[in-house]
Amino acid sequence: MKALIEFVEKKIQPNFEKGGKFQKFHRSFEAFQTFLYVKGDVTRKGSHIRDAIDMKRTMFHVVIALVPALLFGMWNVGLQHYRAIGLEVTFFDQFLFGLIKVLPLVVVSYVVGLAVEFVFAEIRNHEVNEGFLVSGMLIPLIIPVTTPLWMVALATIFAVIIGKEVFGGTGMNILNPALLARAFLFFAYPAYLSGEVWIETSLREGQQLVDGFSGATPLAMLAAYETEQLPSIIEMFLGTIPGSVGETSTLAILIGAVILIATGVGSFRIMASVVLGGLFMGGILNIFAVNEFMATPAYYHLVIGGFAFGAVFMATDPVTASQTPTGKYIYGALIGVVTVLIRVVNPAYPEGMMLAILLMNVFAPLIDHYVVEANIKRRLKRLKRAPVKV
Amino acid sequence: MPKTIKIRKGLNIPLLGSAERILHTAPSADVYAIKPPDFHGLTPKILLKEGDPVKAGTPLFYDKYNEKVLFTSPVSGTFQEVVRGEKRRIMEVLIKPDGKEDFVDFGAAGVAGLSREEIIERLLQSGAWPFFRQRPYAVMANPADKPKAIFVSAFSSAPLAPDFDFLVNGQETLFQTGLDIIAKLTDGDLHLSVDARNTRSNAFLQAKGVKLHYFEGPHPAGNIGIQIHHIAPLNKGEVVWYLDIQDIVIIGRLFEKGFFDPTKIVALTGSEVLNPLYYKIKIGAQILSFAGNNLRRDNGVKCRLISGDALTGTKVEEKGYLGFYDNQVTVIPEGNAQEFMGWLIPNPNRFSMSRTWPSFLMPWKKYRHDTNVRSGERPFVMTGLYEKVLPMDVLPMQLLKAIMINDIDKMEQLGIYEVAPEDFALCEYVCPSKIEMQSVIRDGLDVIRKEFA
């Protein structure tokens, strides 16, 4: 490996340095270089030693935490497809079908998103940030598998430019880029993101849909008050239901949550308070229970739709969430409350999670503002109590 | 035992090479240096010419903006050279020792008869004044101020920090004399903070004329700023002073014997030291003069020599000198080697506070920590991390951002008066975005200080 590193530093690097042939692309080169190996840069100011963690490793752990949901999502895409056409096939065939359908979404999201990131890094002359490694994985997991690839590309470009770069890049954005991509598709191409889009039903010759096939998600069923058709709670928890690619399996998401909490990368405060907020609001609606949706047990909300996925992977985005410890509780709880409210009280948008998180992203700075004000007030109070200086 | 102040937030970085409790008396160094950059914001004015003879206690330079504050020679010998850096900034004032122990005689004086003014006068003349530092700003104290209180920490929690019990061993009476002297400089209290678990020395536990506080917890529990925050937090407009325990011993010696003898004990620590132990030296000694034959040099690894601890110390060159306030020298390997897939491979020899590295599975392990930065600088991304290592009611990220955008009102409101760069050293250590937080805090303090100067 030493030889490889030496080759990169001696033979390739000079081309990208000042005066080199590819000087314009030196940020892109740097991104690949630092991916390949940690450079021998030492501390110059301040602390002489630094924690081994960096953004690459942090983001890598989020991606790892997403893998169970991704793999399950692939299998579920196949499962739902073959169920819809009434074919009994092996587990392997189901997974393979899903893999073929999902992989292009992932590839398009990464390639397009990273391309935009690289372009902005070169224009602005800063290092390529690792944030998109996570966003690029999130985007394919929160859209229907039937989304056309050009739409994925368009949404990704929109999310990265309007969601992130106009604010100054990673760390400066107000809205979660991945959710923004989904919201963009949801409002720009509503036909592709609602209705019977959750299951891949393109048929080959000789295939046909089974009788009585609906393809509706549990959320849609609830919104239409068709509770008798609802899958069992176990099915919904395991995730063998229609839905966005990665959101269906609460179990797979829980595995991711354990990884995030154990490594300390994801905020337990936010995850827990989103869940509590959702249960709280669901409980209140249960008390009134004027329609079937309101009467649905509060915990159903945790396993249907994007609630679990949003709570674990979306709400916890450190940049767009509240940044103060106290603020995180308020922010999380409000996401839970608003999600259930949107779902139950406003059935025009059955998926409340996306809108709730985006709404609270906007409010997060306000929540932080009040937490910071409280800190300032404590300090001012102390000043007043202090003995008067003569 | 009175109430213990428990510090829950913080981090002890497990480094290899803590000093054994063995004391070597080092021979006189070839050269001594007083380094004006040790005193933040100081503009020195040189008083002597090259070749002038000096005694221990002879003024070398003074503070341009406070002419009474003198900086004196730690040894007798000749004024050798003024080393200048960029823009002719004075970096080092070198003294060549003559091996004789000639002291300027300031006259022995008991504690009892002296007034506050007389004490300050004597401290200023002898060059002992710069031992006094102040908060806010973490700079040398102004003799014209009347501090609200004076704080002394009887322990350090920094990585590989020396054992203060050992430093004060045999100097108990001088330490008490020093305490008696400095107690006279404030109308408020003289606070002495000890480690509730580890402080054993009666010099601290039985100290007279002080308010004793017990602290417990990980680094930065030993930082004076953290202690002030928990004992009596600093408000706008207030000034407190603080000193190091060995400097109090030197002040005790000054009043007891009548001369300025800055002899102190430093710990030589770090993974690149063969036998980490303590040395008796004088302030400003050339580090290699006592540490030279105790460093690991055969393995071809480039070392970094740090005067102070690994988090807040000053990098010194091969021929460098001990800093004015430092009681520790740390020697660790430079991290200038590339590491293939270094960010990914879970190398068991890397330490991290986060549980993304295997180090959390091995709480007993000590690390040969190098100086690699690990990554380029990124904007703030992770949150909630810095709060975990800053045991203060201060919102670290919000304060740092206020400084970055130069918002003076916000800085004040968010508690800039209570913090010093060293209090943010751990935040800087754990930061995955590798933001230079100690410099940011220092910049903020400079801005505020200028604003109200």
Image: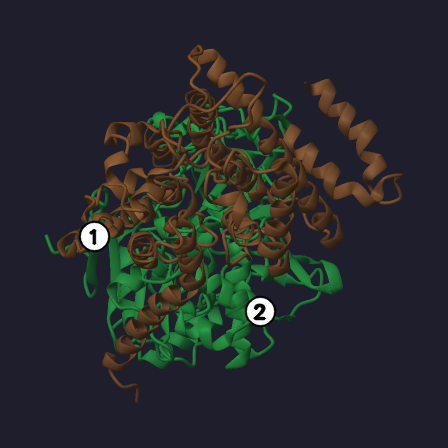
Chain colours: A brown, B green
Q: Chain of mark 1?
A: A
Q: Quadrant of residue B299?
A: top right
Q: Position of residue A18 (x, y in %)?
A: 85, 45
Q: Is residue A379 left or right of residue A19?
A: left
Please name the amino acid that badge 1 sits on: Asn
Please name the amino acid that badge 2 sits on: Leu
Q: Position of residue B130 (x, y in %)?
A: 47, 66
Q: Which residue in the protein does label 2 denote?
A: B42
Q: Nearer the viewer, residue A39 or B50?
A: A39
Q: Position of residue B351 (x, y in %)?
A: 45, 32
Q: Is residue B384 left or right of residue B315?
A: left
Q: Residue at x 53, y 52 (%)?
A: A180
Residue B169 visible (yes or no): no
Marker disc for residue A291: 1
Residue A329 visible (yes or no): yes
Specify the quadrant that holds the N terminus of chain A. Answer: top right
A99 above or below B389? above
